[in-house]
Image (spheres, grey):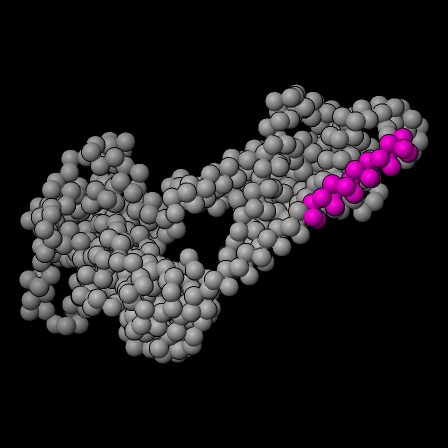
Amino acid sequence: MASALWQGNWISRTRIATGLVLFTYAFFHFINIGLGLLSPVWMAQFQDIRQLITHSLLGSVILYASLILHAGLALWSLARRRNLRMPRGTAVQTVLGLLIPLQLLSHIVYTRYSHEIHDTNDAMPYVIVLMWNSPEVWQQTALLLAVWIHGCIGLHYWLRLTRWWRPMIPWMAGLAVFIPGFALAGLLTEGRRIYDLFVEGSQRADLMAAFNWPSRDAFAQLLRTETLWLTTFWLLLALTAASYLLRKMMRRRQAVRIRYADGPEIRAERGMTLLEMSRANGIAHTALCGGKGRCTTCRVVIDDGAEDLPPPEPTEARSLARVNAPANMRLACQIRPAAPLTVTRVFRPDGRPGRAHASQGSEQQLAILFLDMRGFTARTEGQLPYDVVFLLNRFFDAIVPAITEAGGTVDKYLGDGLLAVFKAPGAQPSAEAALEAATAIGLALQQFNAQLADEGEPEVRIGIGLHLGEVVLGEIGSVGHAPKTIIGDSVNTASRLEAQTKPLAVELLISAQLLKAAGYTPERFDLRQVDLRGVSDSLAALPVQQAAALPRILAAAR
């Protein structure tokens, strides 16, 4: 197992490293083509600078070793896949990766190979003239787009889990559209210019001499080389397919039988978890945490074959202990059957409309804001219900836009308070949005209190608790009447933080977890250890006297 994990990591890292080399080359190559839109002289000068690196011995070794390794490891990984099911983005990237060599090999033969063997001057104008008035220009345009899209998808998958990548996506998307557009515009502009000179005839001889245009025999030899290289690629592709099918047949021969007491009987490959076996065979199997062992919704009762399973690992054992599971109950996402099993799923999606698996809950790390109005009961004592409703609606009209404009959503209203959540693609943007909302609430409250003072009414005081942690977002309620809401310990923590604002005489308490997720160093703040009701350990939090002053405190900490 350790050897396979090390091998997988080596392959993954090598593909990333070689992919970055190739993506960097493609980036500057496309910029080079795009300069044809501005000046043929700039295009030529930029190519000369590029070739100082790419035509050097070290540059050539790095570039072509990366190309061979990247393509070879991709075929190796494809051959070793258990099945061809993959996310849509990965599927698009894979298909494009398989199509790239069909055009790239031809391009290399008539440029770099021709330069090395026949001393051809493979300048950009030569390449453009060579392919301009033929279907090749469309094929090379498709190659440009395929290489760029393939590389962009790979880059996104590599960086999507980093904290800084998400905010950069809109900028990177703009750049991803600009680069191929710029390259194609340069190709079109320079193509028209140089081909007109070539066809017109007066400079044709000089251009052919400058390019050291290959002879008829040289072109015949280049065509044979192209055919040989393409044939080799097709053979490698066929070998990959044969290896995949052979491995699949061998795994089927060693398949393990799984019988569901309330469903069908399947045969699945050894080495997969029971949850993976279920999904690979289209068996409905609930797993709200995605198979990470953090929930117990995928658990099964082992009716027969439990003695052939190894004992639970610590992660599985802790999860089972939380639900007081009997000895014959296991998590489907953690066990890897190697012998026949008969199991009963504890939870099953019921399949009714509006009750799909995705609606049952998804685990996310989000920022939560809990807000409550101070002294509400005393303030409204003796008032008519209509007056109480009027005050609450005015209050919420004043502060809720501060939440929604920052990207938050009011999950529920709780009398004179509310619970808001900041759904964002990542912990950092969610935390940043929560801090922005807290500041805006403080400013909105000051304006609202100014209006109350003009009317001779006492000011409204509030308490806000901000926390970030794991929550489950799902539909809670009966079918057809189940609004989406959030549940989890993090919600309770935010509520108890808000409760502590009253004895501390502050408007806002921010947990250290949220500050850290937002990119701040918690140690730079004057944090307080807060004891929360029902929580054994104290929580470090930042008390803020007035929420409107939060930006000044954050700026000082930076």
User: Looking at the image, which residue is at 73% across and 25% down?
Assistant: 44
Please state the horizontal and vertical placement of residue 448, each as a whole percent of the image: 22, 53
Residue 534 visible from this viewpoint: yes
Highlighted magenta segment, given as a residue range? 215-235
Image vertical order of residue 432 relative to residue 358, above or below: above
Please state the horizontal and vertical placement of residue 79, each as a whole percent of the image: 57, 51
Question: In terms of depth relative to the viewer, which is nearer, 157 or 175?
Answer: 157
Quadrant hosting residue 302: bottom left
User: Looking at the image, which residue is at 29% across and 43% down?
Assistant: 517
Q: Is residue 53 magenta?
A: no
Residue 27 visible from this viewpoint: no
Q: Is residue 53 left or right of residue 297?
A: right
Q: Is residue 32 left or right of residue 410?
A: right
User: Looking at the image, which residue is at 59% across and 47% down?
Assistant: 75
Question: In terms of depth relative to the viewer, which is nearer, 413 or 232?
Answer: 232
Image vertical order of residue 318 relative to residue 101, above or below: below
Quadrant hosting residue 193: top right
Quadrant hosting residue 32: top right
